[in-house]
Image (cartoon, helix red, strand yellow):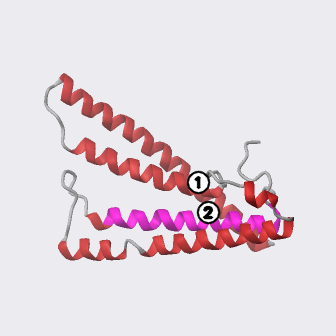
């Protein structure tokens, strides 16, 4: 149980960092969009980089927000059929679903590999900011690793019985 406690502490710390990062990212989006509007409509001198950075921040926010959603099992799901099953079979269906989601996330972690390699070979940079695209593609991988970690933590809590029960998982308390 000591390993589980340490993993839970690590998960809580990582969740805190991700939440702070998401908050800063949303603040950045608001700031850069307002700067863009001001320069375009007040000064009649539009900036080219504000749209690009706002787009990257939005992708970052969604990617890591999804990780937090996975941590707390907050995604929409239809449970009508699984709720009709006997408890033992329902648990088996839930665990099978968990394994399939984990496999999907593993595939997603590997998917940016070719993009990263191509961006490194061609030395591709973002058009307005000049950021190496390989760095941006690495963020995809980091986001999916974060999702997988949080997802696995939720699954471990479910199996260990330390998290929410399957009937009230994801509901507001």
Give the main secondary structure, helix, strand or loop, of the magenta stretch.
Answer: helix
Q: Quadrant of the C terminus?
A: top right
In the rendered structure, does residue 136 fall within the stretch colored magenta? yes
Residue 36: image location, x then y, percent: 25, 34
Q: Nearer the viewer, residue 81 or 138?
A: 81
Start-end of magenta stretch: 135-162
The residue at 26%/41% (across/down) is: 50
At x 30%, y 47%, the residue is: 53
Q: Say the numbered circle drawn on residue 68.
A: 1
Percent x, y for residue 129?
22, 52
Nearer to us in this view, 129 or 110: 110
Q: CA distance from mark 2 to mark 1?
A: 7 Å
How many neighbours does mark 2 have within 10 angstroms: few (below 14), some (14-19), or many (20 or more)? many
Residue 108, given in percent of the width and then of the height, sits at 46, 70
Side (left or right) of 149 relative to 32: right
Residue 51: name its quadrant: top left
Q: Which residue in the protein does label 2 denote?
A: 150
């Amino acid at each position: 149980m000591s390993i589980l406690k340490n993993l839970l502490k690590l998960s809580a710390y990582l969740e805190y960092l991700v939440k702070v990062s998401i908050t800063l990212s949303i603040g950045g989006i608001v700031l850069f969009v307002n700067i863009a509007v001001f320069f375009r409509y007040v000064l009649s001198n539009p900036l080219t980089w504000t749209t690009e950075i706002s787009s990257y921040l939005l992708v970052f926010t969604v990617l890591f927000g999804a990780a937090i959603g996975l941590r707390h099992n907050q995604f929409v799901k239809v449970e009508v059929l699984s709720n009709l099953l006997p408890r033992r079979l329902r648990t088996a269906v839930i665990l099978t679903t968990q394994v399939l989601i984990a496999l999907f996330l593993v595939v997603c972690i590997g998917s940016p590999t070719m993009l990263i390699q191509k961006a490194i070979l061609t030395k591709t940079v973002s058009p307005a900011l000049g950021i190496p695209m390989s760095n941006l593609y690495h963020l995809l991988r980091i986001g999916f690793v974060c999702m997988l970690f949080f997802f696995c933590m939720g699954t471990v809590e479910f199996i260990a019985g330390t998290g929410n029960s399957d009937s009230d998982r994801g509901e507001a308390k």
